[in-house]
Image (spheres, rainbow, N blue to C red):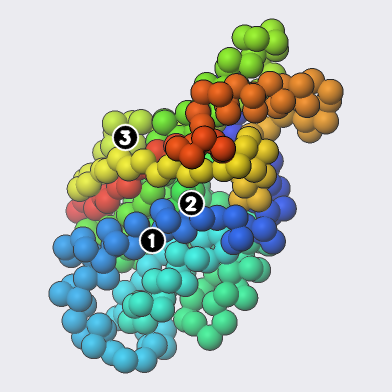
Amino acid sequence: MNDFFIDKNIIKKSFSMAASTYDASSKLQRDVADYLIKILAGFQGGLLNSKAYPHYHNQKKSLPYEKKAPLVLDIGCGTGALSNSLACKYPHINFFGCDFSLPMLIKARERFRGKNINLLSSDCEFLPFRNSQFDQVISSLTYQWIPDIESAFSEVWRILKPKGYFIFSIPGPRTLEELRASYKKTEETLGKKGFITLMKFQKIESISLNLKNTGFENLLTQNTLNIKYYKNLWELLKTLKATGAAPPFPNGGKSLARGLILKETAKIYQKNYPSPCGTGISAVYHIIFAVAQKKM
């Protein structure tokens, strides 16, 4: 398979088209966000830890925007599930959310009615914020879509206050390994080399190096495996498409070759990677969680 070329215009279009179906199909994304919230809540010194900002944690009502209140930015907020959950649990924090898909932000705005959350449309590599503005930056399953992750991490470093925290999740290299192996076997069987491209995800060591190179102290990196089950390959691909993450095919994927390849891939996938009950298929999502701090 050819290396996956990250075209942000295509990715932006894909996520914009998926805005109306994203929430109903994003079980994995919700699971990852929930786990990220647990890391945020338990991390000593983090803004969600009551010992860090006791005055604000004692407040019973949402505070109006004020300079003294902690500022947290959710990068790649999508339809706002992560920010919304955090805003409900921690009304002492002023949240900002940004995403490069306007339809996603429109969905997020509907979800945020009545909450003190500010939304902006922006690219991760060019954040429209002042230097040293935020106490904490969070992000869930966003940075795999960035062509130059080190440049994007540098932007996070720029907008964080000294000693500010950057806490995020990103897919690891084992993500969808069954689909990758099945596609490869299909290419060998049908002699269709290079017809399908799948994204390659960074290893945890690479993520740690990227953080170090941009001036962060890497405080925690953690690998987790999340296994999901689907009726068949078609349901898996439908879920990926509904969340904006479907693998691309040449020429829009409307050729007869596409149908032949998918049919053969479905057969190989079912044979080699059945679900425990034997009637469906399994898919591994390898998720890396990281906590980093901006050095002085």
Disc 1: which residue: 34
Q: Position of residue 167 (x, y in %)?
A: 32, 54
> Separation of disc 3 and disc 2 at Cα?
20 Å
Q: Quadrant of residue 231?
A: top right
Number of residue marks:
3
* Residue hosting label 3: 204
Circle 3: residue type: Ile
Q: In the shown orientation, is residue 189 left or right of residue 216?
A: right
C-beta proximity under 8 Å, tags 3 and 2: no
- The circle drawn on residue 28 is 2
Q: Is residue 215 visible?
A: no
In this view, 70 is above or below 100: below
Q: Mark 1 to mark 2: distance in Å?
A: 10 Å
Q: Are marks 3 and 1 in contact (CB under 8 Å)?
A: no
Report the residue at 78% width, 26% height from top: 259
Q: In the rendered structure, find residue 198 and report the number of the disc placed on it.
A: none
Q: Say if 8 sits above or below 79 in the image.
A: above
Indicate the position of residue 125 as horizontal and vertical percent values: 50, 47
Residue 215 in the figure: left or right of residue 137: left
Q: How far across and how far down the image is residue 104, in percent?
A: 63, 61
